[in-house]
């Protein structure tokens, strides 16, 4: 997947609060992390990680350049989001207060 396309999918997923599956380990191409994009920049993003059982599992920070595939809005993501919602899961705020302009990870307005 082209880097610009990956960034656009991540941005759209953030704006629409869509569950995503992010593939970033080329040595394990079937492995991925699923969750919601909390914030992102051109260099990196913060993912609200969700386990395969639909349980919140903290946050993951990844470099966007490492991502080679992003799935959003697929059957797996929709079902996982339903599990997450039915179990009344939520993530505590990772970034509180304002984010400095120099920071490379920023919330998208």
Image (cartoon, rainbow, N blue to C red):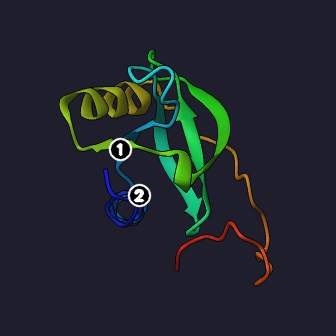
Look at 54% across and 46% down and name the residue there.
66
Number of marks in the rendered image: 2
Direction top: furthest residue: 53
Question: Which structural element holds mark 2?
Answer: helix
Where residue 90 appears, x then y in whole percent? Answer: 57, 39
Alpha-carbon neighbours of circle 2 within 10 Å: few (<14), some, or many (≥20)? many
Q: Is residue 7 above or below residue 26?
A: below
Look at 31% across and 30% down and name the residue there.
82
Where residue 93 appears, x then y in whole percent? Answer: 70, 52
Is residue 37 toward the left or the right of residue 10 in the image?
right
Q: Residue 31 falls in which quadrant of the image?
A: top left
Look at 76% across and 75% down and name the residue there.
99
Is residue 70 toward the left or the right of residue 51 in the image?
left
Q: In the image shown, does 43 or 11 lie closer to the viewer?
A: 43
Q: In the image shown, does 93 or 37 lie closer to the viewer?
A: 37
Q: Residue 52 falls in which quadrant of the image?
A: top left
Q: In the image shown, does 40 or 98 lie closer to the viewer?
A: 40
Question: Which structural element holds mark 1?
Answer: strand
For marks 1 and 2, give the CA distance.
8 Å
Residue ID for mark 1:
70
1 and 2 marks in contact (CB < 8 Å): yes
Is residue 108 toward the left or the right of residue 98 in the image?
left
Direction bottom: furthest residue: 101
Q: Earlier in the sequence, mark 1 or mark 2?
A: 2
Where residue 38 appears, x then y in whole percent? Answer: 56, 55
Residue ID for mark 2:
10
Alpha-carbon neighbours of circle 1 within 10 Å: few (<14), some, or many (≥20)? some
Q: Is residue 74 above or below residue 11?
A: above
């Amino acid at each position: 997947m082209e880097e610009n396309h990956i960034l656009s999918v991540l941005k759209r997923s953030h704006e629409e609060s869509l569950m995503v599956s992010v593939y970033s380990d080329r040595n394990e191409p079937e492995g991925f992390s699923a969750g919601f994009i909390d914030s992102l920049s051109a260099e990196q993003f913060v993912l609200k990680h969700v386990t395969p059982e639909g349980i919140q599992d903290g946050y993951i920070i990844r470099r966007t350049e490492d991502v080679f595939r992003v799935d959003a809005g697929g059957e797996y993501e929709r079902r996982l989001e339903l599990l997450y919602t039915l179990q009344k899961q939520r993530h505590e705020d990772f970034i509180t207060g304002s984010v400095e302009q120099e920071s490379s990870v920023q919330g998208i307005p």
